[in-house]
Amino acid sequence: MTWHVFAVWDFMSLLKSLQRQLTCVDVPWMVPPNLNSARFINEIVLNEETDIDLDGSPTSHLSLYLQAMNEVGASHRPFELFIDAIKGGSGLTEALQASETPEFVSRFVKFTLECALNAQLPELASAFVFGRETLIPDMFRGILREWKIEKLVAPRMHYYLSRHVDIDGNQHGPASIQLLSSVMNNKSDSMEAAARYAVKSIQMRISLWDGLHKLIKETVSAGAIIPH
């Protein structure tokens, strides 16, 4: 969780980039060209940036994750150093180095930010759909099941995972497929670009999880944690 939190954070840059392109955040305001896509993205922003926590107060999903980290005793000091460096004006690479982020995490975050800043809309939507929205529900279902994370033991962790399973699995995942289809608009070049980014996004996700798995095994072998 100490390093996975970076992937929770960088998701918002993908989402905000889509919001910029599919809605109007300019002044003077204009009606977005595709209101269905605009509504969908705004709904996700509402949930991700200002969801409701267990106490009924508005909170971001990043904040929920940080609360879950506190609950299970995971350190978020490296992430705090990273955010402080970004706020202080450091570039992405410099901030990642300041927090001593592992290379596999840095690669993932750099890919995400590069996509958010420079990808074309079909590429961006594809990375969002296949690298995030359609992957998360099954992944979090598996974590809840295999790790036996229960409400009474870790209520905030359980809430964070269950919330994503519910929202992404039942609402956002299916709608994101429709969004991607809309932005591709049956254009062959858009579909090819989207396919490339889908593959790349999944490859980056696999690399992230492989790196985390290796790190966990090394930590267990060193006797720092005891597997249950």
Image: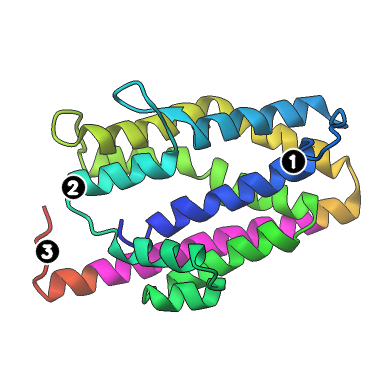
Residue visible at 27% across and 39% down in the picture = 157
Residue 21: image tag? none
- Range covered by the magenta-colored residues: 193-216
Q: Nearer the viewer, mark 2 or mark 1?
A: 2
Which badge, 2 or 1, is on the more N-terminal residue? 2
Q: What residue is disc 1 on?
A: 180
The amino acid type found where label 1 is placed reads Leu
Q: Which residue is mark 3?
A: 225
Is 52 or 35 nearer to us in this picture? 52
Q: Is residue 47 left or right of residue 29?
A: left
Residue 191's x, y, as percent? 82, 51
Res 213 → quadrant: bottom left
Q: Look at the image and tell me whether residue 139 can be seen.
A: no
Residue under circle 2?
A: 72
- Quadrant in which the N terminus appears: bottom left
On the image, the x and y values in percent for residue 10 come to 52, 55
The three-letter amino acid code for the residue at tag 2 is Val
Q: Of the residues under marks 3 and 1, which one precedes in the sequence?
A: 1
Q: Position of residue 45 (x, y in %)?
A: 59, 35
